[in-house]
Amino acid sequence: MFQRFYEFSRCLPERAAWERLNEGMPENYDRGQALCFDAAGGWVGCKPYNGNQGVVYRSGPPNGTDLTPCCKFSDADPTKTLARLKRAVVQLAEAEEVSVEGRDWLAATLATFERESETILAAVREARAAAGEDADHRGYLYWADAAMAPVYGWPAVREVLVRQALRAFAGGGVRESGCCAVCGGAGRTVYGNYSVLACYNLNNPGSIAGGFRADAAHRNFPVCGDCALRITDTINLVEGRLSASMAGQTYLILPYSNDPEVREELGWRLEQHPERYRLDRTADLVADELELVDDFAARGDQLAFALVFYKKQNAAWRVQAEVQQLLPSRLRALHRAVKEIAAAPDLIQVDKKEDKPLRITANTFRDFSDAGLKPSDETVRDWLSALFAARAIDRRHFLHALVARMVAIGRRDPKLLHYTTRQAWGLYRFARRTGLIVPPSVKEHPVMSEVIPDSAYGRYVREHQDFFHRPELVVAFLTGCYVAQVTSVQHQERGGAPFAKKFVGRVLTREQLRRLYREGHAKLAQYDKLGYVITGLDPDLANAWIYCGDTWSISDEEATFAFTLGYSLAYRIGQLDRAAAESAA
């Protein structure tokens, strides 16, 4: 990961060390308050500054202070923020980089701050109330002279910022002449503390670069100051612009190229159009198109991405899954498949107000990621990683997850079963189109032509023959279509369908499917509605059972999936077939 960050940093514009460390203020922190002191260090007042341009800010630890005399307001009470800002000024007043005159002035302002603390606190509260802070307009506080010129703008502050950062790096040991593990440079001062980059903890034995000795971190993973600052800067940029969350997983993407011209163009674009290449916080790589991919379309796959799923918590930064090469062509293939599934008429949810196409997203994978109703982070990462890497997963495991979700929904809320079935079927077809799953390579079964009827359902089976590759699957599907007719009749006759309790929320075996056919036939006879199926579906299904014979080589989950497809889609399949016939006529 450090190497990837370093390689990406080479595409970025060169900047001074302090610029690499400067975090600036987030966009929503645009209500500044300046604590102003005159040339003698006397209190002038708290003056407002709207905006955050040019702010030099580097956050420090929660229980310490920030590295420049500028602090974000932490809560409604400014007392803690004032105390934090004071500590930053105290440190600056003791820094050798600051001139004697500067240190004297800072000492005078600190004395005034102590002496008039209540007055200053009241002034800050009044100024914040007048500024109108809210969630979209947050506040920050900084030390300044009578003309509101900020102390963080002093050149000496920039030098102190760099020295403090390098001193933090030295927490894991320092060597005056070593070889950097990132850039390979020899004879450089190298450091070992990377907890400041939230990658590991020096106070957590066994999880640091030096093993169980924090002071030996510089031996196992020595990094020079230049690389440390480059990586720090790059991590801040990536977390701010190129990281997002999809399906509950935090991720980042790092563009890279082996072509010097592409790297140069990438650096130019990042410098000229920084906002254009900022991911939305919920950017979904499965369904959403990236500006970066569009702008480099003419370059083909010369620009690629490293995709990293990670978890950041306190000082821990852990890689959870990684796709080393995510190609633009792969992203475009996924987006084409999303559009194709959305255009599939059989998967559209027909509503009284509007028709709703099925949209496959990363969250669709998350919905089906566990055998039940609780998503599995590990499974969704495995699936998404394989999807982006164009790597196939086990089809049986995938189908198991789809069926488990359908069964669980059937038990909990049967009204959602048809929608969930369309989701599952759409996701299966998406996975098939993108190569995430590969159907079994089999020759057409000898009796398939006899099993598949000449009807709307038979035409649907042939349209999706890579799934319906065995007679048993056709039998299960037609049984589902048959049972859909039974429940429809029961709804008309009784205002409900208790017959559905025999199969909804259950994994179905061959014998249960046979029983559903027999009992469904009896129900239709009971309601005197055999005429609905007597000339079509009933003989077709009976014929399919006969030709299937004693052969039954599919799993119960495959049978359940095929049956539920028939049960949930039978009406829509018939509707579309009639519309096609009318159009042809």
Image: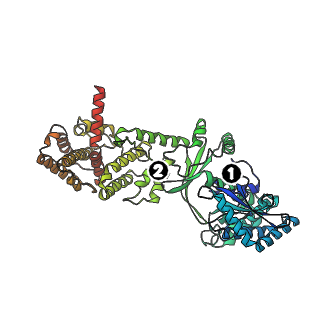
Q: How would you rate the neighbour count of disc 1 (Cα within 10 Å): few for under 14, some for 14-19, many for 20 or more?
A: many
Quadrant into which the C terminus falls: top left
Q: Amino acid at mark 2?
A: Ala
Quadrant into which the N terminus falls: bottom right
Q: Which of these two is toward me, 52 or 200?
A: 52
Horizontal side, residue 504 vs residue 331: left or right: left
Provide the residue designation for mark 1.
9
Q: Is residue 382 above or below residue 198?
A: above
Provide the residue designation for mark 2.
362
Q: Amino acid at mark 1?
A: Ser
* Residue at x-position 27% and y-position 42%: 570
> Residue farthest to the right?
100
Q: Position of residue 287 (x, y in %)?
A: 48, 45
Q: How much space separates mark 1 and mark 2, taking CA atoms?
A: 29 Å
Q: Which of these two is toward me, 48 or 86?
A: 48
Among numbered discs 1 and 2, the one appearing first in the sequence: 1
Which of the labelled discs sits on residue 213, or is there none? none
Task: Say which element carries label 2.
Answer: helix
Q: Position of residue 526 (x, y in %)?
A: 11, 48
Task: Say which element carries label 1.
Answer: helix
Number of marks in the rendered image: 2
| Quadrant of residue 573 within the rendered picture | top left
Q: Position of residue 342 (x, y in %)?
A: 41, 41
Q: Is label 1 or label 2 in front?
A: 2
Q: Position of residue 185 (x, y in %)?
A: 74, 56
> Residue farthest to the top?
585
| Quadrant of residue 267 within the rendered picture | top right
Q: Which of these two is toward me, 506 or 30?
A: 30
Q: Is residue 491 visible?
A: yes
